[in-house]
Amino acid sequence: MADVLVLEADGIGVSFGQREVLRAAGLRLRAGGITALLGRNGEGKTTLFRVAAGLLRADQGWIRFRGRTVLRPRLARLAQQGLLYSSQEASLAPGLGVREHLEAYARRWDGAGRLNDAVERMRLGEWLEHRAVGLSGGERQRLSLALALVRAPACLLADEPFAGVAPRDREDVADAIRDLADTGCAVAVSGHDVDDLFGVSDQVIWMTAGTTRELGTPEEARESFEFRRGYLGPAR
């Protein structure tokens, strides 16, 4: 299953005014696989995800989703085809409660049979009557991943899912990501939390100077002299 390419993005270039953010960047996400995208702040990780999700138009490059080239990527259309983008600041409605979010997703994506398992998996039972606006960063991430479990997407782009998450919640986040991959979902996760990202991923992409480099497995990435020198540092 992991040999089936679900999302491909190649040659992606994006500039904001005179500032070039992406230059020939790319992603290749396979069914059942988890890819970690690492890079320093400002290297364009979020920009690449937003282009792939149809939230931002690229100046150049192409995207293929589930075997079809997408000429004008739009989030609504890609979502219909199975793509889910989860940002660092989760796209939650402040006025809605946790239960309301989950039930809305269950109705929209035929996920009623997955709802209770998602609540239990992400330990949200005691928060069901709380409003999203009152949740901590880690609780919001758990809710976002519970929504993903309810929806069961073909592809998940999770932008910094470990950011602001307490140590006791990190295992829940990692387990949910693995659960999604086990269903055949192609997952990409970004961030700076090397140990967490390496612990959950199968493949590593390094973003530097607006470009991407596929480094192989986490073990192979750690063996890359350029990656250690340019990102991990000598202690790693």
Image: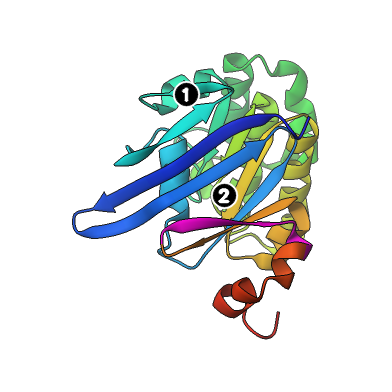
**The magenta segment:** 210-219
| Residue wearing tag 2 | 135
Q: Is residue 211 magenta?
A: yes
Q: Nearer the viewer, residue 71 or 108?
A: 71
Residue 155, given in percent of the width and then of the height, sits at 62, 32
Inspect the image, locate mark 2, and give the three-letter code of the amino acid beneath it.
Answer: Leu
Inspect the image, locate mark 1, and give the three-letter code of the amino acid beneath it.
Answer: Thr
Residue found 62% across the figure and 35% down from its top: 129
In the figure, residue 165 lies in which quadrant? bottom right
| Residue wearing tag 1 | 69
Q: Is residue 230 magenta?
A: no
Residue 110, given in percent of the width and then of the height, sits at 66, 14
Residue found 27% across the figure and 52% down from its top: 15
Residue found at the very far left of the displayed protein? 17
What number is the disc on residue 153?
A: none
Q: Quadrant of the C terminus?
A: bottom right
Secondary structure mostly taken by the magenta-highlighted segment of the chain = strand
